[in-house]
Amino acid sequence: MPGAGAPPARPPAAPPGNVADVEAHATTSQGAGAAGREPDGPSEEPSRPDGVEPRPDDGAGGLAPLSHDGVGSVAVGTVAWLVALIIMLPFADDLRADGHLWWLATAACGVGLGLLGLVIVIRRRNRLRHAGQTAPHSGV
């Protein structure tokens, strides 16, 4: 039996630059339902999980501003980076020996960027509070 140990023959390759033949060969060789195939027709699922579509008169496409100002979130992240930096400082020599001294730099950058972020979100919160106090009241 000639070629009993030989691998199965491969189909001939498409000529260079013939994309249509390559794509046709790729989809037929992978079989139905292969990854990369697009579904036929539009999706029957709603665009939002709760099934509620945004009203066109919302002005912001159905999005509303968040109710919190972000100061707490940024403060917690900054404190977490600071704690990591403080914990790693006594181990700076070990980190250097293991080639992980960049961990200290990462924590220091986290603290620095967190402080910058705190300045930004505190200024934003103050602007929002000020805008809420000076907004004209409708009614009389």
Image (cartoon, rainbow, N blue to C red):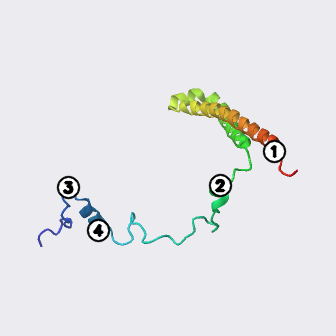
**Whole-Å distance between the Cαs marked 4 and 2?**
49 Å
- Sequence-first tag of 4 and 3: 3
Q: Secondary structure at mark 4?
A: helix
Q: Residues within 10 Å of mark 4 (few under 14, many from 20)?
A: few
Q: Amino acid at mark 2?
A: Gly
Q: Secondary structure at mark 2?
A: loop
Q: Nearer the viewer, residue 127 or 134?
A: 134
**Whole-Å distance between the Cαs marked 3 and 2?**
51 Å
- Sequence-first tag of 2 and 1: 2
The numbered disc on residue 29 is: 4
In the orientation shown, which residue stands out farthest toward the top? Answer: 93
The numbered disc on residue 24 is: none
Q: Amino acid at mark 1?
A: Pro
Q: Position of residue 85 (x, y in %)?
A: 64, 32
Total count of labels: 4
Q: Is residue 32 left or right of residue 80?
A: left
Q: Residues within 10 Å of mark 3 (few under 14, many from 20)?
A: few
- Residue under the image location 65 percent in, 67 percent down: 52
Q: Is residue 82 visible?
A: no
